[in-house]
């Protein structure tokens, strides 16, 4: 039988469980909406019961103080069977911790975007006098609509409030606690920035720098205090950001506002229209993160000028058919437009054909490239710059069978450079349509970081075959940027017996991390 708490909230499923309770997906029967219920389960003695009630109230007060798009709303707090519960906004998605589980990493640009949003949440919290004190991957939710949320203010500190944690007692996740908290027991705003730095390091590098495999929190905290932060090797443009966040002197760490300015400079040089992404100041839930155009939008074809002698090639025949459903009519119109264009463009110089294609809707361009021979399509792609070639190849990402013959006909430098400009999921889709030897040749030209991201995202067997086709020099350069646990698994399965030679090509810090997993 489904449990109903407070005669109002029907528990649907457990979203997560921790040392201090559980989070449930629930239905608010009074308002007919989905919410998240956080249940704090105390130990059965009066002292802990009182503390947990205070902690629930403290979290509700902390969240009520803050208004920011990256912080969930709290709706209510109540007690059921002497256990405190919080009623919060439900955000569908998964945690950053789940996304990087098993040594997986995220792309540099995605890490910068997540950090930008979390820094905004911390800035709002600190301005309201709230310290989070437990920033870590499992407390960052990546929503399905592209939003980023900082959650779990259960151990937050509020200015002007009495502390709930006993003196000389450390609460939080050991590997993410700032050194000044371990040494002096003091929580300061800069401590949240250190925790964000460790979170980013873990997400980019594929391992947590101070985590100890025996799980001993004391050994982990001693490492936080005594062990230098490993030099990041996979963080690219975020290397300087990590160094700043992980400065052992709290006063030298950036404020959330300064961090956001730095991250904005990293994020905004990219084309702001790519993937339909809005400017950084816009709320991410206000737009479609996929960037896809609505299906009911008419295909866009830029008509040539009146004096253009080729104007006759763009006359679209076949009007609407009687009683034809609108979606089918639009699909037929795209197909007819594309068929006529493919015939017309085949007779033009490639550069002219490419310029005319640039004026067409994406659906039309994709259809035209699919209808053309691979040779003709490759000539059009070759006629432009790397950026223009990447824009056309991006359309073919979901269609590797069409893309593969075109990629094979492109100059290696152009094809590789184009792949380096595409989203990771598009590159992976394109590469899976090629043989490993073909993939490796192009990926090396796309940049070692791009190649490493692809190796980390491919199925293990495909990634292993791809690495085996690389020279020792290139294998070492690529694997330097692959998470250590993934490198170890690839080397264990290495069929050509080059494990020792490849290990020798890796930088010593990376080799040390890989050997821990071998």
Image (cartoon, rainbow, N blue to C red):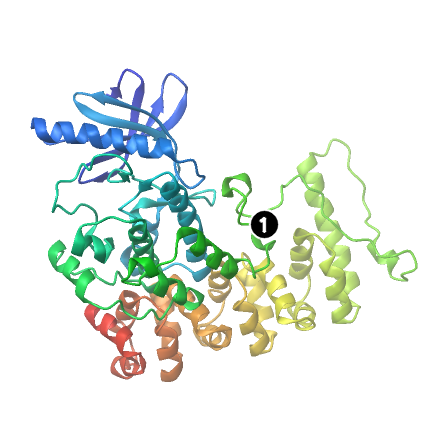
Q: Quadrant of the C terminus?
A: bottom left
Which of 426/453 is in front?
453
Q: Residues within 10 Å of mark 1 (few under 14, many from 20)?
A: some
Q: Pinpoint residue 354: horizontal percent, then vertical percent.
A: 72, 65
Residue positioned most to the right: 307
For image coordinates 54% across by 59% down, the residue present is: 397
Which of 89/391 is in front?
89
Above or below 506: residue 239: above
Above or below 124: residue 9: above
- In the rendered view, does 68 fall on the left or right side of 243? right
- In the rendered view, does 313 fall on the left or right side of 393? right
For image coordinates 55% across by 58% down, the residue present is: 268
Which of 471/367 is in front?
471
Q: Which residue is mark 1?
A: 276
Element type where label 1 sits in the image = helix
Q: Pinpoint residue 248: horizontal percent, then vertical percent.
A: 27, 62
């Amino acid at each position: 039988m489904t449990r109903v708490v407070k005669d109002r909230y029907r528990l649907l499923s457990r979203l997560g469980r921790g040392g201090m309770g559980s989070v449930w997906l629930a239905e608010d029967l009074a308002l007919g909406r989905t919410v998240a219920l956080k249940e704090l389960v105390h130990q059965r003695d009066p002292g802990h019961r009182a503390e947990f009630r205070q902690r629930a109230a403290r979290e509700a007060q902390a969240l009520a103080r803050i208004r920011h798009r990256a912080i969930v709303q709290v709706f209510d707090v109540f007690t059921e069977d002497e256990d405190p519960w919080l009623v919060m906004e439900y955000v569908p998605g998964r945690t950053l911790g789940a996304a990087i589980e098993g040594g997986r990493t995220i792309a540099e640009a995605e890490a910068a975007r997540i950090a930008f949003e979390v820094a905004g949440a911390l800035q709002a919290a600190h301005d309201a006098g709230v310290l989070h004190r437990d920033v870590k991957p499992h407390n960052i939710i990546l929503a399905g609509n592209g939003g980023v949320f900082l959650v779990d203010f259960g151990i937050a500190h509020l200015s002007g409030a009495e502390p709930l944690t006993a003196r000389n007692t450390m609460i939080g996740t050991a590997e993410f606690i700032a050194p000044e908290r371990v040494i002096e027991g003091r929580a300061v705003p800069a401590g949240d920035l250190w925790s964000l730095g460790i979170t980013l390091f873990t997400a980019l590098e594929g391992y947590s720098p101070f985590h100890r495999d025996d799980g001993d929190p004391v050994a982990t905290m001693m490492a936080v205090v005594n062990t230098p932060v490993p030099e990041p090797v996979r963080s690219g443009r975020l290397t300087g950001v990590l160094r700043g966040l992980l400065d052992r002197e709290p006063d030298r760490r950036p404020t959330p506002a300064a961090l956001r300015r730095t991250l904005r400079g990293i994020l905004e040089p990219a084309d702001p229209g790519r993937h339909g992404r809005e400017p950084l100041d816009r709320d991410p839930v206000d737009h479609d993160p996929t960037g896809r155009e609505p299906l009911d939008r008419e295909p866009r074809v830029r008509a040539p000028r009146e004096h253009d002698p080729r104007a006759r090639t763009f006359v679209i025949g076949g009007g609407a058919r009687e009683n034809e459903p609108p979606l089918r009519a639009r699909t037929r119109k795209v197909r007819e437009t594309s068929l006529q264009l493919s015939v017309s463009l085949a007779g033009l110089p490639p550069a002219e054909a490419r310029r005319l294609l640039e004026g067409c809707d994406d659906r039309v361009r994709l259809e035209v490239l699919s209808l053309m021979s691979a040779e003709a399509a490759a000539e059009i792609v070759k006629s432009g710059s790397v950026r223009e070639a990447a824009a056309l190849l991006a359309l073919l990402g979901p269609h590797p069978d069409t893309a593969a013959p075109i990629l094979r006909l492109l100059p290696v430098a152009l094809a590789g450079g184009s792949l380096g400009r595409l989203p990771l999921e598009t590159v992976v889709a394109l590469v899976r349509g090629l043989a490993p030897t073909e993939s490796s040749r192009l990926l090396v030209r796309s940049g070692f970081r791009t190649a490493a991201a692809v190796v980390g995202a491919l199925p293990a067997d495909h990634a292993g075959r791809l690495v085996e086709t690389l020279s020792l020099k290139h294998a070492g350069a690529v694997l330097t940027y692959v998470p250590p646990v993934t490198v170890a698994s690839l080397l264990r399965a290495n069929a050509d017996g080059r494990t020792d030679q490849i290990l020798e090509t890796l930088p010593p810090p990376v080799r040390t991390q890989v050997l821990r997993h071998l």
